Amino acid sequence: MFDDLRDTLRTFSTRLDPDERRRMSTGMRDALVHAKLALQDLRTALAGTEARLEAERAELDTVRRRQGYAADIGDDETVAIAERFAAQHAERVAMLETKRMAQQQELQLAERDYDAMTQELRRVMSGMAPTDSTPEQAAQREVEAALSDDPDALLDLESTPPPSRRTRAEREADADARLADLKRKLGR
């Protein structure tokens, strides 16, 4: 019943002072500008790869068509040459398709990172302290705290406020899952 109130009170305690907020937001804005430029570079590279792929597919179709014409008239020498060129173009098409797929995945990952950075900047600009951007980072921090010799490290983790948008059941399920994962990693 009082979880929302408790979360709200914790939120107030995680506010940044104006100087810290300004310093953090300036650095984050710079990082966002660089990330946006990198996204544009990734999109440009992907478009170039797609154009090369289409051109290579067109060349492959042309070579196969010529191979068929040569076979129809019985020109075995031209058929052999066309087969060699068709194999080269098919190999390039396969390589470019793989490259395009990797570039698409890289672009998707970069876009997700950019969105997360944007959300984090909004959080900092609103006066809130930055959070762990991914559950993996939070879990890593917990493991490092559990394995450290510092007994206060675990206490610091307990004072970290949970996200206020989740229900108590979701937070408890998440905590149980992390505890089981931590026990598994520690071999208990």
Image (cartoon, rainbow, N blue to C red):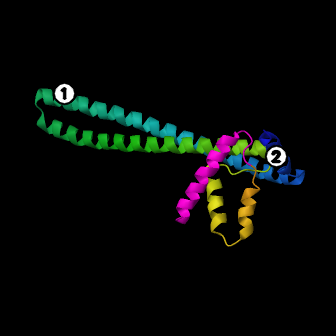
Label 2 SS: helix
Query: What amino acid does circle 1 point to?
Result: Tyr
Quadrant where the image shows the C terminus: bottom right
Q: Residue at x 24, y 32 (%)?
A: 64
**Would residue 90 appear left or right of 34 to someone viewing this image?**
left
The Cα–Cα distance between marks 2 and 1, rounded to whole angstroms, is 74 Å
Mark 1 element type? helix
Tell me which numbered mark, 2 or 1, is placed earlier along the sequence. Answer: 2
User: How many discs mark residues in the rendered view?
Assistant: 2
- Residue ID for mark 2: 11
Corner quadrant of residue 108: top right
| Residue segment shown in magenta | 162-188
Residue highlighted by disc 1:
69
Q: Is residue 158 left or right of residue 142?
A: right
Q: Position of residue 172 (x, y in %)?
A: 66, 46
Q: Is residue 116 magenta?
A: no
Residue 103, how many percent across, how many down? 49, 43
Magenta region, main secondary structure: helix
Residue 168, label in figure: none
Q: Give the residue at x 60% y 41%.
A: 111
Q: Amino acid under label 2?
A: Thr
Tell me: residue 21, above or below residue 63: below
